[in-house]
Image (cartoon, rainbow, N blue to C red):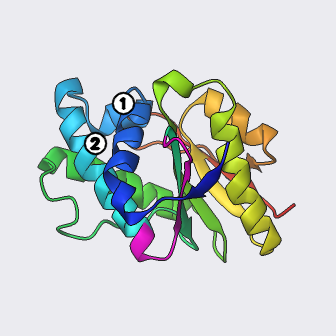
């Protein structure tokens, strides 16, 4: 499997992969509780996130068959959304996003690191090691630069994967009011 940077012309496909991969994610379900609306809201949300990562000089890595993607942001844990960046989302959705971004910012570490914001694999490719290989690609790149990595695990299963890849718990588990728990995790350069 070849892992490479996503081309600007592939943003629609990258967004589609993330929408599919995160449709059943507990955090997505909390932010966008209406399952039918989640399809459209996810498209707005992930398009904004992908564009934001690219604009800040982050990395959007994909598998050569475009079945998996990971977004890496430099030096930031979460962040505040641009006022109009998520145009089209409902006020309640924006409120939950804002609350979550604020918690993520507070839980995030200081200093220089790369934040794995989203790693998604199409449902047909899940549980085959594709996500781990995609993650390792970025971890190898940042380790070579001497930089640590950070992320928030949204499920116990994802936390297990990240631990196998060298991450350790980093601070207390947190959750927005009524939202699912998120586990901050840190990995020093190997």
Q: Is mark 1 on a helix, strand or loop?
A: loop
Placement of the C terminus among the 4 image quadrants: bottom right
Labels 1 & 2 near each other (Cβ < 8 A): yes
Residue lying at 56% horizontally and 31% vertically, measured from the top left: 155
Placement of the N terminus among the 4 image quadrants: top right
Give the percent coordinates (x, y) of residue 171. 67, 52
Give the percent coordinates (x, y) of residue 113. 66, 70
Q: Does the magenta stretch include residue 58?
A: yes
Residue 145 shows in the view: yes
| Quarter of the rendering containing residue 38 | top left
Region in magenta: 54-66
Q: What's the mark number on residue 42?
A: 2
Q: Is residue 75 left or right of residue 96?
A: right
Q: In this view, does 121 lie to the left or right of 170?
A: left
Given the current orientation, which residue lies at the most extreme right position? 190
Q: Is residue 155 left or right of residue 82?
A: right
Residue 148 shows in the view: no
* Residue in the foreground of this view, choosing between 165 and 2: 2
Q: Is residue 65 above or below residue 62?
A: above
| Quarter of the rendering containing residue 156 | top right
Give the percent coordinates (x, y) of residue 78. 47, 62
């Amino acid at each position: 499997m070849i892992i490479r940077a996503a081309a600007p012309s592939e943003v629609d496909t990258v967004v589609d992969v993330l929408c599919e991969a995160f449709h059943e994610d507990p955090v997505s379900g909390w932010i966008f509780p209406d399952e039918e609306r989640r399809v459209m809201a996810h498209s707005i949300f992930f398009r904004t996130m992908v564009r934001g990562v690219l604009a800040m000089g982050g990395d959007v890595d994909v598998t050569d068959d475009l079945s998996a993607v990971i977004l890496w942001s430099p030096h930031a844990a979460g962040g505040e959304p641009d006022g109009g960046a998520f145009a089209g989302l409902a006020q309640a959705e924006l409120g939950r996003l804002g609350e979550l971004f604020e918690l993520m910012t507070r839980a995030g570490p200081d200093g220089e690191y790369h934040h794995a914001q989203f790693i998604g694999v199409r449902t047909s490719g899940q549980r085959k090691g594709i996500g781990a290989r995609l993650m390792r690609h970025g971890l190898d790149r940042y380790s070579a630069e001497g930089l640590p990595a950070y992320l928030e695990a949204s499920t116990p299963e994802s936390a297990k994967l990240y631990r196998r890849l060298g991450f350790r718990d980093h601070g207390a588990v947190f959750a927005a009011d009524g939202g699912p728990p998120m586990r901050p995790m840190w990995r020093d350069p190997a």
